[in-house]
Amino acid sequence: MRERPRRLRQSPTMRALVRETQIQADQLILPMFVRDIAAPSPINSMPGVVQHSLVSLANAAVEAQAAGIGGLMLFGVPDDKDACGTEALSVDGILARGISAVRAAVGPDFVIVADVCLDEFTDHGHCGVLDSQGRVDNDATNQLYGEMAVAVARAGANVVGLSGMMDGQVGVVRDALDHAGFHDVVILAYAAKYASAFYGPFRDAVQSSLTGDRKTYQQDPANRRESAREVRLDVEQGADIVMIKPALSYLDVVADTRATVDVPVAAYVVSGELAMIEAAAAAGAIDRQRAILEVLTSVKRAGADIICTYWAVEVAAWLKADK
Ligand code: PBG
């Protein structure tokens, strides 16, 4: 026997020498929720995750920055919802105020991704506005995304996360940002976003009022080729970074995307993926830290450069302790 693969596994140092994939703290993005409340409020279906007040948000942002992670992704939880998601466009809205508070606390360069989508702000819970027959109106929605992107850029976001899955949204938002002078605001496009059961806890987190589903705009989990098309269209329209979401059930799509584009690829380990692992760990069925690191490593190994994860700060601390 000449080939003995086990030779390279004989000790921790040998294994470190040949390790192919490393998770890096500065390529992790922490999603956060902000609401007009006096004190942070736990989200029952997402252990360890809270809805922040403006004050606790800014403090947690500073801690996250100090932990060495790559950035934050902010979602607003408004008190008032209406058919058009008006609060999403307002400088006085909770998302814009959250972004401003964080920007003031973390300085000019730290990455703040603002979610640009209407679902948290609409009373019907859809990611866009509805036409007279109650269907999501793609092109009217894109105009609002353009306005929202400019509003969050004004508030201090240097990246916009386009999560609504409307056709043509990247091009419309790029034009709106450029027209307002925000040439340097980065577009992180949720290029392939599937209609997933794993968003369940997030809808608790943002107190979503959705009845029904998002299957006319988010993708069918059965489709792989369709993601290549979605990714191609987003890159053609000017996406700076493309994201796949969820992550774990879509590692094939992450790998396909990495192989075909020359922009950075991100993947979002979503709320239901967090909830599953936390539940299994709480039940004593798996080792929590090892499971989390294994999951994030698998997302990286599949080809993601950037990972959005609610565990970002905790993982950054583990990585530091490990060095
Ligand atoms: C929509 C949005 C969703 C998530 C991020 N942005 C929910 C949805 O599409 O229903 C889910 C994130 C998660 O589950 O962690 N703006």
Image (spheres, rainbow, N blue to C red):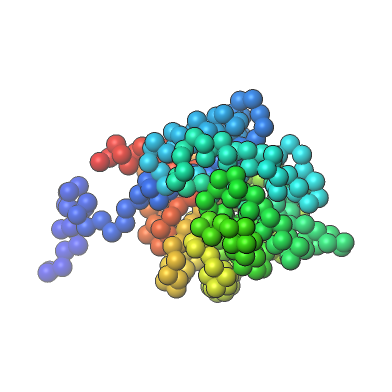
Q: In which quarter of the image is the C terminus?
A: top left
Q: In which quarter of the image is the N terminus?
A: bottom left
Most distant residue in the left direction: 2
Q: Which residue is drawn at 40% across and 58% down?
A: 305
- Is any atom of residue 215 visible in this view? no
Q: Position of residue 32 (x, y in %)?
A: 55, 41
Instruction: Please count the marks in the image.
Output: 0
Whether residue 78 sits left or right of residue 13 in the image: it is: right
Whether residue 299 sits left or right of residue 158 in the image: it is: left
Q: Position of residue 286 (x, y in %)?
A: 42, 41
Q: Position of residue 26 (x, y in %)?
A: 38, 48
Quadrant in the rendering for residue 255: bottom left
Q: Residue at x 12, y 69 (%)?
A: 2
Most distant residue in the right direction: 132
Residue 112 lies, with reference to residue 231, above or below; the image says above
Whether residue 186 sits left or right of residue 219 in the image: it is: left
Query: In the depicted view, which residue is nearer to us: 142 or 91?
Result: 91
Q: Where is residue 49 in the image (x, y as percent from the top left)?
A: 54, 36
Q: Which residue is drawn at 65% across and 35% down?
A: 35
Residue 243 lies, with reference to residue 57, above or below; the image says below
